[in-house]
């Protein structure tokens, strides 16, 4: 039987995000955030679901951490809800919000579970959106103020920090396509938002360095290997442009301090190029300790004369898919890891999210036998192992997600968890994939 052993100190973890699991949306002084607002507007979310209760993790976190402990999970990526700390986004601190995260983080550490904290996982305080949100450069300063307080409070006990989760999704889904909060549909705004988020990232990295903290800090990007539908030069160019739009715009800025020339030219021609300075780019590319990658699927592109602004359209192939409709394409993870290793100087990498939504059911024995999810995870971890064996500095893997949770525009219709959540009773059921993952962690290896 083939066994794939990972490096001795490889980080095996699970991941969640505040708005998706906490609930308690207006409890203990928490301010309104843009997802509280966006989900309150009928039509935005599947069946008008919202995160008001979610997995009630705000009240059930001790029970959830017990499950992690039972499974032998030693690393947990969580996010902090900015509006719990600063209800207005800046200024007055909400002590009860701060106390919640102190309890949560201290409980994790007392159980030997290392926290990796994401400072921003999409839940901007609404008060800041009311002044323009991330399109307003002033919000950058407020983000630095929030980060400074988090570093002061938790900098000595949190070993891994992620400034932002997926600036591309915040920018494009939230400000160009309008399918995420705050529901804006304007590419020029979207690209300015992306730039300001990246600038806030760089400023916070510099702040972290100035505080002489002993942990590691990075950023998480959602990346996808891109493929042309055919070898026709128009399709090949479409894939290159989409690669620039999704991947290289962010990778080059953070790791090289420049925006890719081909995309700068395209955005300038389309009059959607953001305003930025050389100084901005120098700050954005402040050296990070690791690059976080969220990988779910590849992207297949074809030339499309009518597709604004890229003249490239995603193609939906008839291949095996997850419940999100995303093609299951494990080799795309290998392609991505090796490309980044070779093109971006061998930067240390953490897979900060990988996982799959499937239509889980509880069987007559009260179990969730999610072999399809085990298959997805196995295949992707095999590709990760292949990349490591070829020299890629992959240091860890955080499975998305620990719990079934609020899947943004899809509400509770999509289940990504390795722990099933019955939203009517808040009962947790550990899925078979969790037991499988527990074994992978214990053995630090994959067995065929
Ligand atoms: N249209 N469209 N979309 C194209 C690709 C979107 C990529 N979505 C992600 O990566 C999100 C990431 C997020 O951090 C987490 O909060 C989400 O729950 C997971 C699952 O969705 C993933």
Image (cartoon, grey):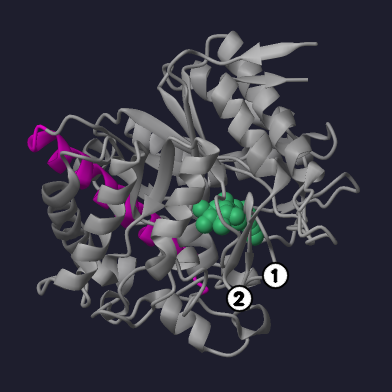
Q: Which residue is mark 1?
A: 413
Q: Quadrant of residue 325?
A: bottom right
> Which quadrant is home to the N terminus?
top right
**Gap in Å between the C-alphas at discs 2 and 1?**
16 Å
Residue in front for this viewpoint, 440 or 277:
440
The numbered disc on residue 337 is: none
Residue placed at 44% from the left, 36% from the top?
292
| 411 in the magenta segment | no
Image coords of residue 375 (percent x, y): 78, 36
Drawn side of residue 290 relative to residue 93, left or right: right
> Which quadrant is home to the C terminus?
top right
Q: Is residue 238 visible?
A: no
Judged by depth in the image, the label closer to the viewer, 2 or 1, is 2
Residue placed at 61% from the left, 60% from the top?
404
Q: Is residue 283 visible?
A: yes
Q: Report the number of numbered marks.
A: 2
Residue placed at 48% from the left, 81% from the top?
38
| 189 in the magenta segment | yes
| Magenta highlight range | 185-212
Image coords of residue 78 (percent x, y): 40, 51
The numbered disc on residue 425 is: 2
Residue in front for this viewpoint, 350 or 105:
105
């Amino acid at each position: 039987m083939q066994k794939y052993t990972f490096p001795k100190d490889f980080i095996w973890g699970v991941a969640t995000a505040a708005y998706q699991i906490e609930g308690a949306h207006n409890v203990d002084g928490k301010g309104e955030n843009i997802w509280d607002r966006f989900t309150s507007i009928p039509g935005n979310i599947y069946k008008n679901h919202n995160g008001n209760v979610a997995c009630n993790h705000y009240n059930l976190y001790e029970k959830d951490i017990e499950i992690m402990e039972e499974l032998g999970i030693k690393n947990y990526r969580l996010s902090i809800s900015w509006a719990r700390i600063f209800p207005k986004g800046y200024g007055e601190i909400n002590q009860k919000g701060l106390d919640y995260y102190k309890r949560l983080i201290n409980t994790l550490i007392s159980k030997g579970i290392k926290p990796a904290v994401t400072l921003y996982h999409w839940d901007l305080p609404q008060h800041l959106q009311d002044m323009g949100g991330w399109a307003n450069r002033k919000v950058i300063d407020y983000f630095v103020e929030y980060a400074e307080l988090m570093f002061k409070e938790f900098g000595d006990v949190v070993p891994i920090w992620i400034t932002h989760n997926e600036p591309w999704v915040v920018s494009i889904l939230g400000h160009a396509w309008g399918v995420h909060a705050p529901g804006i549909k304007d590419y020029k705004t979207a690209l300015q938002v992306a730039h300001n988020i990246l600038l806030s990232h760089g400023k916070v990295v510099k702040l972290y360095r100035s505080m002489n903290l002993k942990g590691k800090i990075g950023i998480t990007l959602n990346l996808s290997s891109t493929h042309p539908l055919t070898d026709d030069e128009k399709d090949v160019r479409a894939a290159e442009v989409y690669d620039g739009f999704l991947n290289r715009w962010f990778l080059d800025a953070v790791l090289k301090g420049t925006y890719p020339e081909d995309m700068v030219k395209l955005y300038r021609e389309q009059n959607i190029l953001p305003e930025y300075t050389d100084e901005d780019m120098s700050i954005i590319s402040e050296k990070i300790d690791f690059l976080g990658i969220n990988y779910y699927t590849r992207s297949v592109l074809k030339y499309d004369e009518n597709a604004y602004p890229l003249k490239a359209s995603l193609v939906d192939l008839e291949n095996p898919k997850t419940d999100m409709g995303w093609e299951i394409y494990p080799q795309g993870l290998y392609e991505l890891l090796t490309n980044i290793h070779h093109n971006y100087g061998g930067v240390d990498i953490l897979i900060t999210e990988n996982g799959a939504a499937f239509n889980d059911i509880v069987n007559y024995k009260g179990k969730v036998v999610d072999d399809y999810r085990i298959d997805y995870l196995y295949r992707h971890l095999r590709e990760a192992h292949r990349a490591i064996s070829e020299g890629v500095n992959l240091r860890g893997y955080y499975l998305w997600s620990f719990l079934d949770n609020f899947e943004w525009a899809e509400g509770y219709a999509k289940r990504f968890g390795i722990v099933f959540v019955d939203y009517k009773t808040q009962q947790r059921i550990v899925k078979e994939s969790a037991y499988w993952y527990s074994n992978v962690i214990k053995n630090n290896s994959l067995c065929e």
